[in-house]
Image (spheres, grey):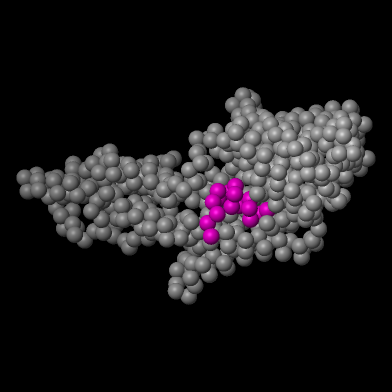
Amino acid sequence: MKLMDEKVMQGTPHRWGTLARYGAKIFSSSLLSPVQINVCFAVIIGCAAALGAYVFKWLIDLFTHLCLGGADPGVRGRISFLGEYDILVFPALGGLIVGPIIYRWAREAKGHGVPEVMKAVLTRGGRIRPIVAVVKSIASALTIGTGGSAGSEGPIVQIGASFGSSLGQWFRMPPRRIINFLACGAAGGIAAIFNAPLAGVMFSMEVILGEFEKFSFIYVVLAAVTSSALSQYLTGNKAIFLIRYYQLASPLELFAIALLGVITAIGARLFSAALNGSEGYFERRVPIPEYLKPALGGLGVGVVALLIAVSSDGAGKRILGVGYDTIGLALQGGLSMNLLLLFFAAKFVATCLTLGAGGSGGVFAPALFMGAMLGGAFGSMLHGLFPGATAPPGLYAVVGMGAFFAGMAHAPVTAILILFEMTGYRYTILLPIMTCSVISTLVASLISRDSIYTIKLRRQGILPDQRKADPLKAIIAGEIMIRDPQYVTEDMSIATLSGLVGNTLHTSLPVLDRRGELVGLLTYREIHYALRTSHSRPGLLVKDCMNRSPLVAFTDEPCDAVFNRMKDADQGIAPVAKRKNPRRMVGILTYRHIYEAYRRALMY
């Protein structure tokens, strides 16, 4: 039998052991309170998110400069070799590179990112692999820079959240703190990339966490403020969209704004359903290897862009990438109603192709694009009918941006704040944005209870409504198991076993064969039976008495499920193994350690 001290790991792989043990010793001491620890980490995560956003934007600009040059049809990329047909080739080429990167290193980087972050909060205690930040940065920058129709919001949320989560895991923090750090990273990323700290905070609280707990709010605010301040130092403090001085012609125009809210809600719901259908179609119906699907989607985007170029005097590049230049034209009233509707439809299809096929990028920028086009077209029609009684179409384009995102994400507060910050704090547009965003959210919620983020989770069988679930659902067996556990061998005699009873740390012991594989379990019942009958059967061995079909937990199994199975099996100890080799025991789990994990989760 192997007698060793218990080594209970609280969520940190061995390769991080030295740093983790040192950090855990510091932060478990009485020198710092939990609140002080979280404040320190919030500031660190905010700085990291700002630096991550800076590098990510630089990568996007680099790939865009090399491949496309810009939204202006006359500006070519540095490696242009097909002239006007670059827009057909580069999105597919980008997908051809992105697909294998995601497939090989981090499949979580596929798609728009936010559902994966929410999934980590709901099912994994906030744990995200560190490699996700690196792969997401490169894959999303390539997707956007080569012309894929996607945005930077989803990637920067996943990048920032990955760093916050990894920091919590490195220092062996309990799940509640890891989730808080994840939310800090997400808020810091939004604050830095859009120069919108208020919106970053609201996005994390409203979408990622789904709750407004006091201390979580404080930490998220600190991370967002730190990230925004550092980002402004690195890149300057300027609004993304510069708009004219817009205001409503009269209070009665709010009725038209309300109608636009209904229209954007319907458009947002159609887009959510179409993107979800596109993801499902590419996953199940397209019979090619997974790593080639982004290239197929990119080719489809190129075809759409080429058709737009033919029908709109070379403006096909305006639907590629994030599309901020084209949004700026709509906000200034520089596009006709026909072009606005054409660009809306093209962006709708291109985004479904890019992200549905497995490209990497966010849905926020496409939502702003489609909302601006839809709102601008509605405003152009209304202004043409009532020129003296309505505001210019540019106001409706601004309002449409926020309303489309609000209806798509079911996040009206985030939509209001991010548009307010991205347009330079124009107070005259605040009332129409609030009206339109709230109505869009209400109508979209009546059409479907799922947002564009939660619809993907529900398709995977995850119920995003149950935010305050049992804390044990967020803790996996591999985090709290005892490594290097005690065990007995199957050929050990009962006489030898009797001399060890009372000297073990557990009431039950795993049984291994000569190859070190799990073959059974000796519980107190089997031990009692063996000792009682050993006098009449002197040659009795452990293998003659053991339970040959013990309950085995898996390293990635939630502790609530393990606890329920142990209770049903009336088994006080569970050997832990990896799913790929259930007979190779890597640890054990007991009731006491599950209870201790539950207590720590409630404490923090």
Q: Residue at x 81, y 34 (%)?
A: 378
Toward which corner of the image does residue 259 lie, by quadrant? top right
Toward which corner of the image does residue 459 lie, by quadrant? top right
**Residue 420 appears at what percent x and percent y?**
75, 52
- Please give left or right for residue 124 compared with residue 297 in the image: left
> Do we see residue 90 in this rendering?
no
**Residue 182 appears at what percent x and percent y?**
57, 55
In reply to whether residue 202 is colored magenta, the answer given is yes
231 or 26, which lies in front? 231
Q: Quadrant of the N terminus?
A: bottom left
- Please give left or right for residue 572 compared with residue 23 in the image: left
For residue 310, above or below residue 165: above
**Residue 136 appears at what percent x and percent y?**
66, 47
Q: Main secondary structure of the magenta part?
A: helix
513 or 531, which lies in front? 531
Q: Quadrant of the C terminus?
A: bottom left
Q: Residue at x 87, y 31 (%)?
A: 385
589 or 203, which lies in front? 203
For residue 120, above or below residue 341: below
For residue 429, above or below residue 310: below
Q: Residue at x 72, y 38 (%)?
A: 258
**Residue 22 appears at what percent x and percent y?**
49, 68
Q: Residue at x 38, y 58 (%)?
A: 599
- Residues drawn in magenta: 199-214
Toward which corner of the image does residue 147 lie, by quadrant? top right
In reply to whether residue 473 is colored magenta, the answer given is no
> Do we see residue 210 in this rendering?
yes
